[in-house]
Image: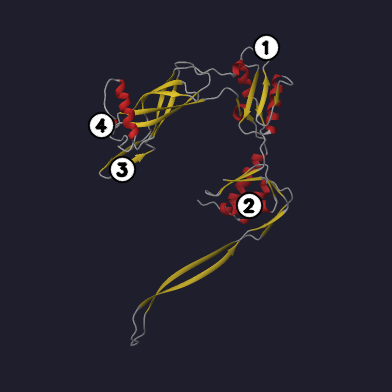
Amino acid sequence: MRIGRAAIAAMTMMLLTAVSSWALTTRIKDIASVSGVTKHTLMGYGLVVGLEGTGDGTGAGFTAQSLANMLERFGVSVSSGQIKVKNVAAVMVTADLPADCEEGSQIDVLLSSIGDAKSLQGGTLLATPLRGGDGDVYALGQGPVSIGGFNYSSGGDSVQKNHAVVGRVARGAHVTQAVESRALEQAHLCLLLHNPDYTTASRVAEAIGEQLGQGAAWPVNETMVQVSVPGDCPNMVELITGIEQLTVQPDSPATVVINERTGTVVIGEHVRIAPVAIAHGSLTIQVSVETQVSQPGPFAGGDTAVVNNEEITVSEGGAGLVALPAQGSLHELVSALNMLGVKPRDLIAIIQALQTAGALEAEVTVQ
């Protein structure tokens, strides 16, 4: 079933009206995070063994060198030039260490091939130290690799599902050094907004003040909200949990985001337009070719030939001039553009023209 343009425009207007009829509220947990309670990025260099001829080739000399160094620690002396093993692949191992992670905990690790391996399927990650930004070892990764797919080739034909040179070891790293959060030991909590905004920061502080008392929280800047920990607070975890569940109405600037590569246009709720008239038209040139057979008359002495008759049709579409009122809302803008019947590519040109004319009260971001 095909849906007409008028039906699509009507559904768009209904959706926009429904969205504007209620104020969007969200939890503080979803728009801010507590300073000091963040994940730590770990990284290491390791080897995956047990591959079925899909490991690194001779072009990845560092794999042979790494394997020779490992064998040396086990008392096997061999030079890297003598090693030609296709069952080993060098990988970079990364992991996220959660805050307040205790020693002995297990976390997932991600493996990414850095050589010319064709697949990590069926491999096993050897013991790999995972270091933090300070150079200390915080975890040790090891275990069977899962790639969530496959990669087979035979006789010049190949079949592949998913990305075969990136894998994961579930709960494959054991934490060897605990990381303590500083946030649970301070007299103040600092909330960091994911999208910095002065209005949102003020609203967050107001919501916390209504729960903990006037003056319990105050915005430091557009990014940070500081919360004073009550003296009778029995448990910091319960305090943070209560703050995270509070709801506020976040604010955002009037923004239009344009991605010219994909033709995507996102118009924010607060976008307004000044009094303006918009005209949009498209010129369509269609060339059609009709093939006919030319047959000479009797005794004419001519030959039968194929003749192509070309016909050129030029049409100019568009709904004429559409006027938008002062301080037009997003609903009116979408309705007017639907009347013009514009496509995403044309919409990009119209928005840029509105900005040039000074009629668009929004920040336009082109990606």
Relative image position of residue 219 (x, y in whole percent) = 70, 27
**Residue at the spot x=47%, y=23% of the render?**
135
Which residue carries the number 3 mark?
A: 158
On-image quarter of the C terminus: top right
Q: Secondary structure at mark 2?
A: helix
Do the CB atoms of the residues marked 1 and 3 lie less than 8 Å apart? no
User: What residue is disc 2 on?
Assistant: 352
Which kind of residue does numbered mark 1 sit on?
Asp
For the residues bearing labels 3 and 2, Cβ distance under 8 angstroms: no
Q: Secondary structure at mark 4?
A: helix
Point out the tag, 1 or 2, that comes first from the N-terminus.
1
For the point 55% across and 49% down, which residue is it?
260
Residue 312 appears in the picture as rendered: yes
Residue at image coords 62%, 34%: 195
Q: Residue 45 in the image: x percent, y percent?
A: 40, 28
Q: Given the image, on which type of amino acid does mark 3 rest? A: Ser
Q: Which residue is mark 4?
A: 82
Question: Against 343, is 178 above or below?
Answer: above
